[in-house]
Image (cartoon, coloured by chain):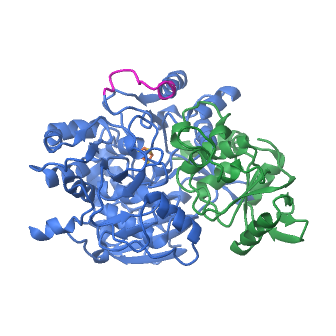
Amino acid sequence: MEKFTQIRSTAIPLPIEDVDTDQIIPARFLKATTREGFGDNLFRDWRYTSDGQQKTDFVLNNPTYQGQILVAGKNFGCGSSREHAAWALYDYGFRVVVSSFFADIFRGNALNNGLLPVQVTPEALHAILQAIEQDPATDFVVDLENQTFTLPATGLEASFDIDPFRKICMINGYDDIDYLLSLKSEIEAFEHAQ
Amino acid sequence: MSKTLFDKIWDAHVIKVAEGGLDVLYIDRHFIHEVTSPQAFDGLKQRNLPVFRPLQTIATADHNVPTKDQHLPIQEKLSRDQVEKLRENCREFGLELYDLGHPYQGIVHVIGPELGITQPGMTIVCGDSHTSTHGAFGTIAFGIGTSQVEQVMATQCLLQRKPKCMRITVDGALQDGVLSKDIILYIISKLTAAGGTGYFVEYAGSAIRALSMEARMTICNMSIEMGARGGLIAPDATTFEYVRGRKFAPQGADFEAAVSKWEQLYTDVDAQFDLEYHFDASEIGPMLTYGTNPGMGIAVSEHVPDMALPGDSPVSFDKSLTYMGFKAGESLLGKTIHHVFIGSCTNSRIEDLRLVAEFIQGKQKAGHVQVMVVPGSQQVAQQAIAEGLDKIFSDAGFDFREPGCSACLGMNEDKIPAGAYCVSTSNRNFEGRQGPGARTILASPLTAAAVALAGKIVDVRVHFNQN
Ligand code: SF4
C-alpha cells in the first residue's frame, strides 16, 4: 500500500447521497482477476451512455473539475462489499473521498488501499461543496497527521476522525496481513484451546 | 456481567487485543466465490503463502454462472475466465470447490446453511456483503473486502474494532400474505439505508421467533441494506431442528453436545444495547420499493412520499424517482409490470418456491410478463423437481431455471432490459443493479407471484381475504 501523509489538490463535487458501490463500479465490470484498470469503468453508467458516448452533464466529464479529492453526499459506498470500488476510485486518481457519512465496508476497503475517507459534519460538507462551486480551482489540503481538511483560500478548516491504528497503517503504508502473519503461534494456540 | 448474544460470540473469538485496541478475531468458516477471490489468491502467491486452514474454506461459483445449460461451457469469455480462475486456484491451494454441475453448487449464502456448514456460535466471513444471511443461526457473519479475504486465507483472522450493538424487536402476528421479506423491507424503510451503519443487529421478539429458519435468513440477509455489518437471531429449537442431520453438521452424540452449547447463546435479560427499536408485526403490509435504495420502501397500499425525508437531499430523491419513472405522491397499485424475478440469496430457498407454487397453482401468468424462477442451489432445484414444483411453474408460464445469482446483479446473462420494471425478490434496487437502466421494485415472493399473474402491481392480501 502507498503511504499517505498530506495532499494538496482541487476537488470534484458529487453531491448525491447513498452512492452505492454498484454505481461506483457496476457488477458487469467485476470480471477482471487483477486489481488494475478499474478506473476506466469508474461510475461507468453515469459517465457513459449505453453506446459508450460520454455524458457531458456528469461531473467527471466536465473539465472544469479536476483533482484527487472526491466530495460526495452522505452514506457514500453503501451496498456491495466489492473492494473493486476502492480500486476503481484509486485507479482513476482519487486519493481522498470526503462525505458526511461512509458505509462501513467501503470505509475499511478504502483504508486498506491507501484511499483516505474523510468524514466531516453535514455543515462542513455543505461549505466545502459551496466553495468548489464558487471556485472550482480552489485547493484543499488534507493532512492525515493532524487529521485536518482545510481550504487555504478561506481558512475553512474541518477536522476528521480516523481509527488510530488505521492512521498509523496509512501513514506508513502497512497492511494488516503483516501483523496477522506475525501472530501465527498465538493463532495456533487459540485453535488448540478450542 | 450480562452479555448480549453478539458479545458472547465475539468475545469467544478474540485471540488478543492488538495495539491500537483492535481485536484479532478468529474466523471459523470462510466462504469464497469467483468474483472477490482472484486478487486475494494472487496476494498469497506473491507472498508465497498457503491457505492456512483449507478445511475451513469453502468455495462455489455463483455470480457469473448462466442459469440455462450449465453443463455447457460458459459462453461469455470474461465470466468463463473468472470461474476457470477459481478452479485453478482451488486446485492449487487444495480447497473444496462446489463447481458448476456439483450437487452442492449454489449461491454461497444458500449452500452454507443447507449443508450444515453454518452452525450457531460461529464466526463466518465471505467477500460478499450478504454474508449477514448466516446470522439467522446465531452466528457473527459479515461481508469483507478482497484484502481481508486474503488475510483470512493467510491467517484465519481479521483485525476488527468491535461494532456497536442494536436490537430490533418485532412482536405480534403478521397479517395473511405478509412474509419475513416484508418485515425486513419495513424495518429498512423506517431506519433508512444508512440507519444501521456501525452496528450489528440482533432481531428479537415473538414475530421473529415464529419464523422458520429460511424466513429468518431472509431477514438477516438484508441487514446490510440498512448499513449494518450483520444481523443475528438467537438460536432456538427451530434452529437446532434445521441443522440436525445436515451433511456437515455434528452427528449423533456430537450433535446433542453441540446443542447444549448452542443453548447458551442468547442475550442475557439485563444486557444493554447501544440502540433499540420496537415494531408491531400487525402493522406491516406487503412492501414495495419505489426508489433506488432499499430504504425507499412503502406498503403496497401507501403512496410514494411527496418529498425527500427531513435531512435527505431533494436532489437525490428527485434523481431516484426520475430513474424509476415514478411521481412523488402517486400510488403504485395498477402499474404495468413486464418482468418478475424470483430468486437471489434473499428468497430462492425451497420454502420460497413452495409458497410461490402453491399460490400460482392452476393459474397462468399475464401474457406480457416474463417470469424467471431461479433456485438458490442445486439441492433446492432437485427438491423442487422432486415435489413437482417445476411442473407447476412451467404450466403457469414461469421460466424455472438452474441455480445461481442470476438477475440479482447484472453480471451474468440474466438481465432486465433498460427502462423496464422488474418486481424482484432480490435485495437491491440500485440503479442498474439488474442490468443497465433496469428499474427494480423489491418485494416478497408472494407479492412477486401475484404481480406475475396480474401483470401489474397488486395487493396480495386481496387474495387471502377472499378465501
Ligand atoms: S444473489 Fe445477489 S446479493 Fe446474493 S450473493 Fe448473489 S449477487 Fe449477491
Is residue A69 at all visible to an observer of this figure? yes
- Quadrant location of residue B248? top left
Tell whether B352 sits left or right of A58: left
Residue A99 place in picture, x, y as percent: 69, 63
Relative to A14, does residue B83 appear above or below in the rendering?
Answer: above
Q: Is residue B181 magenta?
A: no
Q: Is residue A4 left or right of residue B343?
A: right
Residue B153 horizontal/vertical position (percent): 58, 36
Say which quarter of the image contains residue B66: top left
View quadrant of ligand 1: top left
Image x and y of residue B102, in percent: 34, 27
Asked whether B70 or B394 is in front, the reply is B394
Relative height, residue A140 to residue B306 (above, below): above
Q: Is residue B183 above or below residue A105?
A: below
Asked whether residue B194 is in view, the answer is no
Instruction: State the image quarter where residue B93 is shown.
Output: top right
Residue B433 lies, in percent from the top left, at: 47, 48
Q: Which chain is green?
A: A
Is residue B78 in the magenta section? yes
**Residue situated in front as seen by the camera: B346 or B310:** B310
Can you tell which chain is drawn blue? B
The structure residue drawn at horizontal position 70% and vertical position 49%, both measured from the top left corner, is A60
- Which quadrant is the C terminus of chain B positioned in? bottom left
Camera-side residue: A32 or A81?
A: A32
| Main SS category, magenta section | loop
Which of A140/B95 is in front?
Answer: A140
Q: How many marks?
A: 0
Judged left or right of residue B356, residue B346 is right
Q: Residue at x 27, y 59 (%)?
A: B237
- Write the start and end of the magenta stretch as one range: B69-81
